[in-house]
Amino acid sequence: MNTQLYNPFEVLQRQIREAARILNLDDATTEFLLWPQRELKVTFPVRLSDGGVRVFHGYRIHYNTARGPAKGGIRFHPDETVDTIRALAGWMVWKTALIDLPLGGAKGGVICNPRLLTENDLEAIARAYVRATFQFLGPDKDVPAPDVYTNPQTMAWMMDEYESLLQTHQPGVFTDKPQQIGGTEGRRDATARGGIFAVREACKQYGVNPHGRFAIQGFGNAGQRAALLHADVLGGGKLVAVCDSKGGIYNEHGLDPDALVTYKLKTGSVVGFPNAQPIPRDAVLELDVDVLYPAALENAINADNAHNIKAKIVCELANGPTTPEADSILYTRGIHVIPDILASAGGVTVSYFEMVQNKSMYFWDEKTVHERLKEKITKAYQTMIEAMEEKKVHPRLAAMVVAVARVAQACKLRGWV
Ligand code: GLU
């Protein structure tokens, strides 16, 4: 199978159909949930620092807003398409519903390669994107955050552009901002921390050693934070392998997370890290570990490699890393998957905390953020386990059933379907 041809939007629709079947949803509700409510496609020219003008294409997609304002990240990535953004927007709907946040789901993206652009170019693109989309955005309408290759600095530029256009202070229109301009404590490591809280619950549920070996596929923000926090939050654990887009590294005695993150930030890759053996990038997924964190892009675990996964727990910090075929294979092989809509929901959960703090103009301390995050993730984990037992389905389907039921109910209450 050529996994490149796997369209994430088709995966999303398949997941929705399966959940709708289990819930006996009527045809109109199912059809409504299978599609985004609103899609904005923008094309905008930007003068780059080399003096030339380049035309960029971007999207902002509101998948569903029945439960609250649209919420979800903005990516800068060369491979984005309308269908990747649709799928990612849909997964935000199920994420916010599963955690029971009063939010809908959205996603945005600009097709560009940040590796080939300067800091000034990225600022110009961020600002131009906001000028093209701002009527779609707002603290009670649609609140973006960072995603792949965007970060708090991107949000700062975007917020500034939005405020300039509206001539009013509106910090709640973006989340994961720098703390000096309205960001919250605990947002930067929230995705990884939320995933690790879920791992803790899964270890208890399935009798897995929380202090064993773990590996990370993908070493962006979520992957790096997972490396730094795993042993801290769980009280132990050994990081044995990591990869990024350039290659993988392994050390059976353990890699030092602090030194590794410093090395990655300095050199741009984990490849060449001292005292580690180089291994092929995808080999990281197939190692004998207690916990595996896929923290890169979609379709990493697919029908080609699912039979070789040896981890006891797979904690999906990435969005959509496992294809439906791989899901069934992992389930029948007794591998415990913590699905992305739960495992990676820590980010949007703390984004929601940031929105609450921006509305009240009163900020919480770090401990409060961590405690409230733990509460939300733990509760969602238990709800998923109950649905698994009640419906006799695999964890992703159980999580989807809970989320789809909540969104369908909100649509019905509003009289939409
Ligand atoms: N981009 C992150 C995600 O996929 C965070 C979204 C948010 O905070 O709105 O969950």
Image (spheres, rainbow, N blue to C red):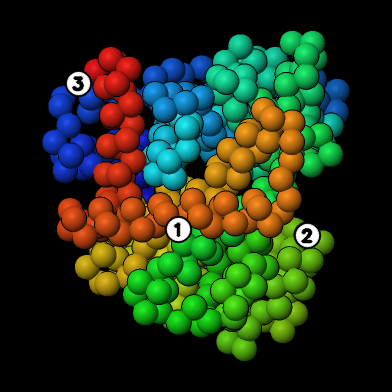
Instruction: Kindly report which numbered mark, 2 or 3, lies closer to the viewer in this rendering.
Output: 3
Whether residue 193 is visible to the viewer of this picture, yes or no, is yes
Count the marks: 3
**Residue 265 screen position, x and y as percent:** 78, 59
Per the image, the residue denoted by label 2 is 265
Relative image position of residue 285 (x, y in whole percent): 46, 69
The 10 Å Cα crowd at callout 1, few under 14, some 14 to 19, many 20 or more, is: many
Q: Residues within 10 Å of mark 2 (few under 14, many from 20)?
A: few
Q: Tell me if mark 3 has few (under 14), some (14-19) or many (20+) residues whose alpha carbon lies within 10 angstroms of its own.
A: few
Disc 2 to disc 3, how far (Cα)?
A: 49 Å
Q: Amino acid at mark 2?
A: Leu
Q: Give the camera-side residue of 353 and 217.
A: 353
* Residue to which mark 3 is pinned: 28
Q: Residue at x 78, y 29 (%)?
A: 157
Find out if the beta carbon at label 2 lies less than 8 Å from the nearest ligand 1 atom.
no
Ligand 1 within 8 Å, label 3 CB: no
Q: Quadrant of the N terminus?
A: bottom left
Mark 1 is on which residue type? Answer: Thr
Residue in the image at 59% along x and 56% along y: 371
**Residue under numbered circle 1:** 378
Side of 355 relative to 94 (left or right): right
Between circles 3 and 1, the one closer to the viewer is: 1
